Amino acid sequence: MSRIPQCLTIDHGGPVDRPFESFPASALERSIVDRFDAIARRFAPRLAVADCIRQLTYAELAALAGRVAAAITSAVGDRPGPIAILLARDVYFPVAMLGVLACGRGYVPLDLSNPIARNQLIATQSGAAAVVSAGALAGSVRALFPKELPVIDIATVGEGGTLRPDLQPGPEDLAFIVYTSGSTGKPKGVYHSHRNLLHDVMQQTNAMHLNPHDRVAMLHSPSIIGGSREIFMSLLNGASLHLLSPQDLQAAGLVREIRSRRITYCRLVPTLLLQIAEVLGPGQRLDSVRIVALGSQRIDWSDFDVFRQHFSTEAFLIVGMGATECGGNFAHWYVNERVRESNSRLPVGRVLPDATLTIVGDDGFPAVEGDVGEMVVKSRYLALGYWRDPDLTASRFATDPANPETKVFKTGDLGRLRPDGLIEFVGRNDEQIKLRGHRIETGEIEMALREIAGAQDASIVVRCNEAGDPRSLVAYIELRPGIQGLSSHEARSKLRAHLPQYMVPAAVTVLDALPRLPNLKIDRARLAQIDAAHRARSADLLEDPLVAQMIKIFETVIGTTNATPDDNVASLGGDSLQSVIVAVELEKHFRIIIPVEIFEGVQTIRDLAGWIATTKACSDFRSTRDRS
């Protein structure tokens, strides 16, 4: 077998009868700005973008983006380089993106939740010529970045400017750089052209029949490639974009906003889908939503069952497979229950048009149907490469000998082809993992661990659930001779200053020496055995009834089993929303108020149990004293 069969049509099994205006292939020969300018003129008075505070019509969005473009040009002049964006998840983010593109530059979206050091590193590595921010945040940015780096404050840009300046970008010009976790210990920038992003938007539009009546909920960070896709698939079709934060709103608030805004499209991860289902309760549905895109985590048929119970009976569920380097998905499908064989993992779909996929075995030849191999993608619309890293680009991307315009990318993802033509995702063939929706290179975390004062070496163990999927990260450190006293709390606090929260290990354990192979490399298999033994010893320590009660609460909320006294929310695979729910359940069960700083500060169930026992003892003593 040389290649995998493609989709019959890109909207196969989806909303084929819904009227819409097909996204023209001719748009790929111009720029994102050209397409937006035409849409903004056509739908000038209609709502373009809204958050929980502000909203802008298409006319207002275009005018403000034009003023931002003029401000960037004035501040930067001829200085080369992309423009970094550091903003909250609000209406200003798409304004900044369009303003940067309009002045012929590419944008580098930074995540406000990242540590300062990480955003500084990305701005430096990208060679950013300026930073776009807003309001009080802009003042903070001036203190964080080099003095010679201009800061453009959207809230104070002057009048004038246009989306169609003299220097207009072309389809092959840089559009954006997205930074992902890097195996070398540093973030790596993946960069794309206007043509690539427009192609992704074209496929999304034509697959989902997006039209100006759609209301798109953007629920994840604009700093990832999916953020750019959802912003522009809305704004380049005359739809309205609604920027909502699940972390701020929590599941109940998100349900309220989806209903009040009559959202028609949203992209969810399975964890958030289950939390929404818990808020809705039996028989309650989000009837306005016509398409749910589910991804970024393992997806099972049981997730499809939850979707079917809580969304309109006419709604569609779409899943897919992609990579930042591929410019989005290279496979997708509208889930059809008729192919269901069990309650296990869902297939990821069929190959999309304009791409070919080969599943390559260990021998370097195409795998036969049913055998596992690495997914290798070939397309004209792959990333341009890794920004300012030609060696890494050359090692991961190749040019198709038969067509110089086509690139070949080895994804590192393992999959197999089913007899029905659907593709199953099996796992990764390297140290990169996907955890709670984030792709993580464990090497980057190990690099940060080694930079902690006193650390000689470090390694990450990936803990998996019963199905074999990554659930949490734990770290093991070997200290230099004579160094003592490094605690898990201290190590994790240091990591938070340099890594996003999703990359901070749930626990850090110091060993006298890391196990090593004869070549002195870390023996990761032996370390995994040590970690398993450590967890087994912890599981035997359930004689404390308080600890046992707490473990039951943690397991119930997070939906897991076999928790130990040395676990916490992160080590059990929970997220920030589940952390809040655990705290609420503990407060109800033990009739005690747990301050946020206490819940976040203690490291394990055992530690939290000790705090609760001490606090309740003090409370009981005060009550007895008051009665006497």
Image (cartoon, rainbow, N blue to C red):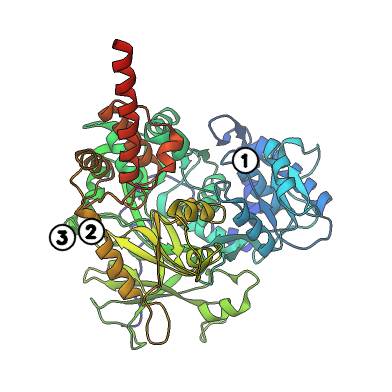
| Residue 164: percent from left, percent from top | 75, 50
Per the model, the C-alpha gap separating discs 1 and 2 is 66 Å
Q: Are marks 1 and 3 in contact (CB under 8 Å)?
A: no
What's the residue at 50%, 65% (across, down)? 483
Per the model, the C-alpha gap separating discs 3 and 2 is 39 Å
Q: Which mark is residue 447?
A: none
| Residue 606: percent from left, percent from top | 30, 45
Query: In the figure, is residue 58 to the left or right of 604?
Result: right
Whether residue 549 is situated above or below residue 487 in the rendered picture: above
For residue 8, say whether it is visible: no
Whether residue 383 is situated above or below residue 52 in the rendered picture: below
Q: Give the structural element (helix, strand or loop) at label 2.
A: helix
What's the residue at 26%, 64% (across, down)? 532
Query: In the figure, is residue 54 to the left or right of 149?
Result: left
Instruction: Between residue 115 and residue 172, name the one nearer to us.
Output: 115
Q: Which mark is residue 341?
A: 3
Which quadrant holds residue 598?
Answer: top left
Residue tagged 2: 537
